[in-house]
Image (cartoon, grey):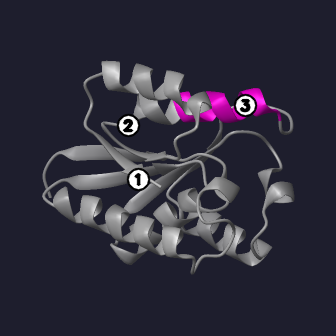
């Protein structure tokens, strides 16, 4: 393998992207795009970066596992598992399969911590997979990410 490259995923709230159903059309389609992007960078040693939230961030971790790619989990707050809608065993398995876990913020949930997580992943990624759901609330972060001149794959749902 050659150069190490960090590929991070930034996704909006799960209920806006195919919900909690892992077999929804949206989630299946996004997984296909994620796998294609990972294959595009296969000449590099890829490190995946995810916040491991329900939905697409979980799908990203599973795509990393399927492609034998190491991934790091940056949790936005402590006790995120209290908000996990899928079976808790899935969450624990994904944490156990990761190559490192860090908390970005102390304490429990607040919306500000989710924004901080997205910014953190953007800052620590060489390549960004950005799931776009057409909500204006995501425009400011996307504009800042585009200004970094990092490769950004925008998957519109």
**Is 97 in front, or is 30?**
30
- Residue 114 part of the magenta-drawn span: yes
Q: Position of residue 57 (x, y in %)?
A: 55, 56
Name the main secondary structure of what is drawn in magenta: helix
What residue is shown with label 2? 125
Q: Using the image, determine if residue 84 lies above or below residue 116.
A: below
Element type at marker 2? loop
Indicate whether 53 appears above or below 5. below
Q: Is residue 39 magenta?
A: no
Tell me which segment is drawn in magenta.
110-119
**Taking 42 as reference, is 115 above or below it?**
above
**Within 10 Å of the Cα at label 1, are there few (<14), some (14-19), or many (20+) other Cα atoms?**
many
Q: In this image, 50 relative to 113: left or right?
A: left
Q: Earlier in the sequence, mark 2 or mark 3?
A: 3
Q: Position of residue 129 (x, y in %)?
A: 38, 47
Q: Which residue is mark 3?
A: 113
Among the 4 quarters of the image, the one containing residue 8? top left
């Amino acid at each position: 393998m050659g150069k190490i490259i960090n590929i991070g995923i930034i996704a909006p709230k799960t209920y806006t992207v195919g919900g909690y159903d892992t077999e929804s059309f949206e989630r299946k389609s996004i997984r296909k795009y994620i796998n294609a992007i990972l294959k595009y960078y296969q000449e590099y040693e890829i490190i995946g970066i995810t916040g491991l939230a329900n939905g697409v961030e979980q799908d990203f971790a599973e795509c990393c596992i399927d492609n034998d790619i190491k991934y790091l989990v940056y949790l936005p707050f402590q006790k995120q598992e209290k908000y996990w809608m899928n079976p808790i065993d899935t969450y624990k398995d994904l944490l156990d399969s990761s190559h490192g876990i860090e908390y970005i913020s102390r304490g429990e949930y607040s919306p500000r911590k989710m924004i901080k997580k997205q910014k953190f992943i953007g800052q620590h990624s060489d390549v960004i997979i950005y799931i776009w759901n057409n909500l204006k609330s995501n425009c400011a972060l996307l504009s800042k990410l585009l200004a970094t001149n990092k490769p950004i794959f925008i998957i519109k749902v």
